[in-house]
Amino acid sequence: MMRKKALAALAAAGALILGLTACSGGSTGSASAGGETGKAGGLITIIVNDPANPYWKTEGDIAASTAKGLGYEATVGAHKGDTNTENTLIDTAIANKSVAIILDPANADGSIAAVKKANAAGIPVFLVNAEINESGLAKAQLVSNNAQGAAIGAQEWVKQMGEKGSYVELLGAPSDNNAQTRSNGFATVISQYPALVKAGEQVADWDRTKGHDKMQSLLQSNPSLNGVIAGNDEMALGAVAALKEAGKLSGVVVGGFDGAPDAVTAVTNGEMAYTVLQPVAVFSEKAVQMADEFIRTGTAPSPEKQSFDCILITKDNVAKMTGAFTYSG
């Protein structure tokens, strides 16, 4: 059902900014310290991981555009996975009297203190893309349905592997719950096929360069592997580069996760088997709409944690991609 809603929303938009209705209902509370209930306006601070990654750049761009469209000022900062930098950005948001913070948390545990600090200053926090390991602090936690996305990706990967072969896995940052959720989702599917044998795995921290270097290392010890499954597109693209350099990309099935533009191109060119589109444009806009709703009415989203189904992108349907991280259905 959620997948149908996401597809319908993306089809109706035809562009990056999607016209979703803000979530209402749930508990009420006071507006942020930087504004007054019933009045939109003021600064919304948006904090992402690293805009060098097109996924996180889209996250920040969509949130900022949505905020400006609703009559707010917006600023985008990046913590690059560092909780100390994240803490400094939260301090700046407080000093600038932000009316809300949209945060892609740096660490499931380490970002809890940052959210608490914002709360103490009376600034509501809306999390996107990743969760923290404590409920009741953020007004909302909006994420992709990573288990569902991992399952549909793994199913496609198994099919293209012919249900047999030797493979390796590239994992995301251990501090991000999404990394383990996706890996578990892959394993749940792949474990049903005993002829698929994992030859190795490496943590590449969501990074293309690390994905390349880790893939080189894995190739040295497993020169005859025929599959790579990666927790995100950047790592998958790094693996593709390493395989091409070694002259071994042909016959190796590489799967990714995000729906990044470079990955979509790689799917089109046959260098990657698929990517799993995360609806980052959807939940980034939704988070700002929720913040606006809370600022104007004091109404907090319900439930706090909400997930959005992912979409499998293969060579068969890649032509339906209409822009960065958007799909026409």
Image: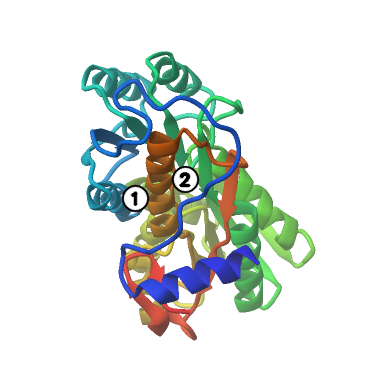
Mark 2 Cα within 10 Å, few/some/many (few <14, many 20+)? many
Query: Badges 2 and 1: C-beta atoms under 8 Å apart?
Result: yes
Mark 1 Cα within 10 Å, few/some/many (few <14, many 20+)? many
Q: In the rendering, at what x and y percent does residue 22 appear?
A: 46, 52
Q: Quick one: SS at disc 1?
A: helix
Q: Is residue 108 above or below residue 88?
A: below
The structure residue drawn at horizontal position 61% and vertical position 63%, both measured from the top left corner, is 2
Answer with the quarter of the image where residue 233 lies. Answer: bottom left
Residue 129 got which mark?
A: 2
Going by the numbered disc 1, the residue's amino acid type is Glu
The structure residue drawn at horizontal position 24% and vertical position 53%, both measured from the top left corner, is 69
Residue that sits furthest to the front in the current view:
38
Q: Is residue 302 above or below residue 208?
A: above
The structure residue drawn at horizontal position 35% and vertical position 32%, both measured from the top left corner, is 101
Q: Is residue 271 visible?
A: no
Q: Quick one: SS at disc 2?
A: loop
Front-lying residue, 50 or 58: 58
Q: Is residue 201 above or below residue 113?
A: below
Q: In the rendering, at what x and y percent does residue 108 appear?
A: 53, 30
Q: Is residue 171 visible?
A: yes
Identify residue for label 1: 59
